[in-house]
Amino acid sequence: MTIKTYLTSDEIQRMIDSTPYLRDKVILSFYADTGARVSELLKLKVENLDLESRTVMIPHLKRGIKKRCPACGRSAGRNTPYCSKCGCDLAKVIAEGIEERSRLISIGEATTMLLREYIGGLNSSEQIIKLSRQQIHNIVRNAARAIGIKGKAIINPITGIKHYVHPHSFRDSLAVAWLGVAGTDVGKQKALQEHLGHQSFETTIKYNKLTPAKVRQVSDEVRALRFKATE
């Protein structure tokens, strides 16, 4: 089995082509095209789409509901029973604060055409994809298996952990391709941050570590210089 760090564009297109179901093509194409999170597609409604301008409003990027300790003021998760700093009982403390951020992203012509065909019978307030997260994962894994990518074929180059192809693999692939085009252009790198909805630029730039082709290019250049004199 070949271990990969991310899916190539060719593999992704073959995954999309492998399924005969329009719904599954929409799911695979949308994730591949936008790099959206699993939850973002599942929350999407018809009214969030503007297929004429090929744009999508991704709603409610993250929700941050926190408790605040009445004794020391430390913040805690909404399900945290006791304050980690002073041990105060937080059972009766009401969690507050909702962070709802949206972002406008573009989609390609192929994804637009699939969406136009798929949402034909839906009303504007209707959810586009009515599936669970696990069902989405199964669709992605089955498509990968259909083109010969089986088992834990993806490795995280930072942690060394191997895993199955999953929706986030499309996000990785888009980021790798985008940064390959951006190079050292900070403006284009920042555009990726906005597109993916990262709060921190550091999160975005970490995807540079997922480009083994660049590492290979540099190592080949070094190798040529090192051994040129002995040829």
Image (cartoon, helix red, strand yellow):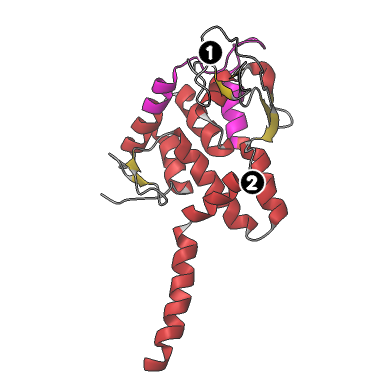
Q: Is residue 214 visible?
A: yes
Q: In the rendered image, which residue does mark 1 sit on?
A: 90
93 and 15: which is toward the camera: 93
> Looking at the image, which residue is at 52% across and 16% down?
88
Question: Helix, strand or loop at disc 1?
Answer: loop
Residue visible at 54% across and 16% down? Answer: 78
Camera-near label (1 vs 2) is: 1
| Residue 157 among magenta residues | no
The circle drawn on residue 2 is none
Q: Position of residue 136 (x, y in %)?
A: 43, 24
The answer to whether residue 167 is above or below residue 206 is above
Counting from the top left corner in percent of width and height, residue 168 is at: 47, 36
Identify residue type, mark 2: Phe
Q: Which of the two labelled residues, at mark 1 and mark 2, occupies the earlier sequence position?
A: 1
Judge left or right: residue 69 versus residue 106: left
220 lies left or right of 175: left
Q: Position of residue 54 (x, y in %)?
A: 69, 32
- Look at label 1 and name its amino acid: Leu
Examine the structure image and report whether residue 120 is included in the region drawn in magenta. Answer: yes
Could you give the CA–CA distance between mark 1 and mark 2, rounded to whole angstroms? 34 Å
- The answer to whether residue 231 is seen in the rendering is no
Q: Residue at position x 50%, y 27% from top?
A: 38
Residue at label 2?
A: 201
Range shown magenta: 110-138
Image coords of residue 17 (percent x, y): 43, 36
Classify 10 Å Cα crowding around label 1: few (below 14), some (14-19), many (20 and above).
many
